[in-house]
Every structure is written in C-alpha cells, then in structure tokens.
Image: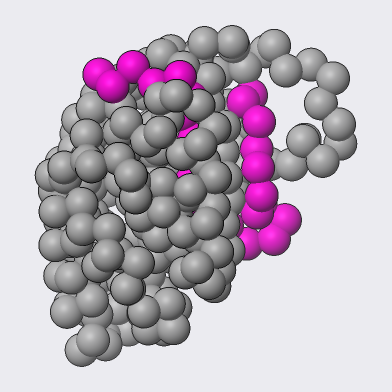
Amino acid sequence: MLVAAAVCPCPPVLVPEVAAGAAPELDTARAACADALGVLAAARPDLLVVVGPAEQPGRGVFPQGSRGTFRGFGAEVDVRLGSGAAGGGDAVGGRDAADERELPPSLAVGAWLLERTGWADAPVEGLGVGELLEPERCVRAGREIAGRAARVALLVMGDASACRTLKAPGYLDERAAPFDAEAARALSAADIAAIKALDADLAYQLKAAGRAPWQVLAGAAEDADLGGALLYDDAPYGVCYLVAAWS
C-alpha cells in the first residue's frame, strides 16, 4: 500500500553543475524537493519507486543501481539509482544487458535528489513511462506498484506546462496557466479524481511531461487516504515546476 509520495520537477538544470552560473535561481526548488523527500523517509517505506517521463529506450523498469549521467548536458556528474539505499546499488551484479540501460533524464534527476539527501531507507526501483501513455494504463500501473509491498513510497518526477512565457520551450500558450493551476490544486489536495481527469492530449500540447507520472501516483493512492501539501509552485524559464508531498 502507498504510504507516502513526493512530487518533484525533473529538469536537469536542477543539478547545480548543469545549471552552472544560474544554479542559485533554483535553490528554493531544490530545498522544497529535499523537504518532500524528507516526508518519504519519515514514512519508513519497504520499497521506493521513482517514476518519471521517458522516451524510448528509457521506458520500463530500472533496478536499483542503474546508472545515469548528466554528461550530455555539459556536466561531469554521474549517478546511480538508490546507490546508498538498503540492499546497496553494488549488490545487483549479474544484471542482463537490458538492465544496463542508462537512466532517462527524469530518473537521473530523481537519483541525484536521492543521493543529495542521503537516501538509505529502503530498496529503490525506477519506472520510465511514456509521455503519451493513456490515463487508464497509468492508473493501472500505479495500482500494481502499490501492491508491491506493505509500505510503498513514490518519488514522482515530472514538470507541468512548458508554455508559460514567450521564451518558454513551448512558447506562450494561454491554456498553460489554467492547466498548471489545476494540477497544482489537485496535487496540493491529493485529489485523485482530479489528477486522473487531467487531459492527456492537452498536457502533451503544453509539454507537461508530468501528467503520466502524476496519474501513476493517482492509481497508487486510490486506497491510501493520503493528504497533500504543495511545497513549491513557480515557472522559471517559462516552465512550471511543482513540488508536493503526500502522507
């Protein structure tokens, strides 16, 4: 059963070495992510699953110890998923070739957050989901995750719209602010029905890659009766970043 969840944005610029001189601009977001991960640790889960948007071949399950890197973003920073967690990332010898896939950027950011906060509380796995995955399949995946252990926690990576300003990656779209406001409200209230109802087509048009991971969370939380809190809501660079904690 799901006992806690943290929702965090997943831009590689969250990693200071990637952001370089602009790193201080996201200090508040980083602090909020750390607070959200603190909620996960306090829940004492038996299993932590990191869920994030991914393109092929980064979709599917990634075992503990999977490697990620930010070298493609100009920073010599490498990470391992749950390297300090119970069971240890180095204890996954014998993985087959499919398990040697590199973490997609969203899960690499999640792994970096876990390393930054010194996560060592429970085994960790990753799940990369397609940005266009149908809501029903997202919800089903969440239900399956929640049934994996007696106490499951989720670290849910994903951004809201990327269309809040003229200089945003998706340019300015007047539909972006209302979409982001509803997503923020739903995450702050742990409103499962509202998260399930987020429009997948609109989210894709607004480049809101968090939609599918959020709906995985909604499926996992169906029987959990969790409350939510919104810890961060801002749109630097024209992209809406949301941080929330459920417990």
In the current view of this chain or complex, which residue is farthest to the bottom?
174
For the point 23% across and 27% down, the residue is 39
Report whether 169 appears left or right of 88.
left
Q: Which residue occupies the extreme front position in the image?
A: 223
List x then y, in percent, for residue 239: 28, 66
Identify which residue, 53 or 2, lies in the foreground.
Answer: 2
| Placement of 29 over or under 141, stated as above or below | above
- Placement of the N terminus among the 4 image quadrants: top left
| Residue at the image position 23 percent from the left and 47 percent from the top | 243
Is residue 107 visible in the rendered image? The answer is: no
Residue at (46% x, 39% y) in the render: 146
Q: Nearer the viewer, residue 244 or 25?
A: 244
| Rendering quarter of residue 26 | top left
Q: Magenta segment, which residues?
A: 42-65
Q: Is 83 displayed left or right of 226 in the figure?
A: right
Judge whether residue 59 is colored magenta. Answer: yes
Color theme of the render: one colour
Question: Vertical placement of 58 versus 182: above or below?
Answer: above
The image quarter in which residue 233 lies: bottom left
Q: Name the spot of residue 188 as percent of width and height, x first.
A: 14, 52
Number of numbered markers: 0
Q: Position of residue 200 (x, y in %)?
A: 43, 77
- Residue name at image x 27 percent, y 58 percent: 192
The stretch drawn in magenta includes residue 217: no
Q: Is residue 178 visible?
A: yes
Q: Position of residue 80 (x, y in %)?
A: 58, 26
Quadrant for the C terminus, please: top left
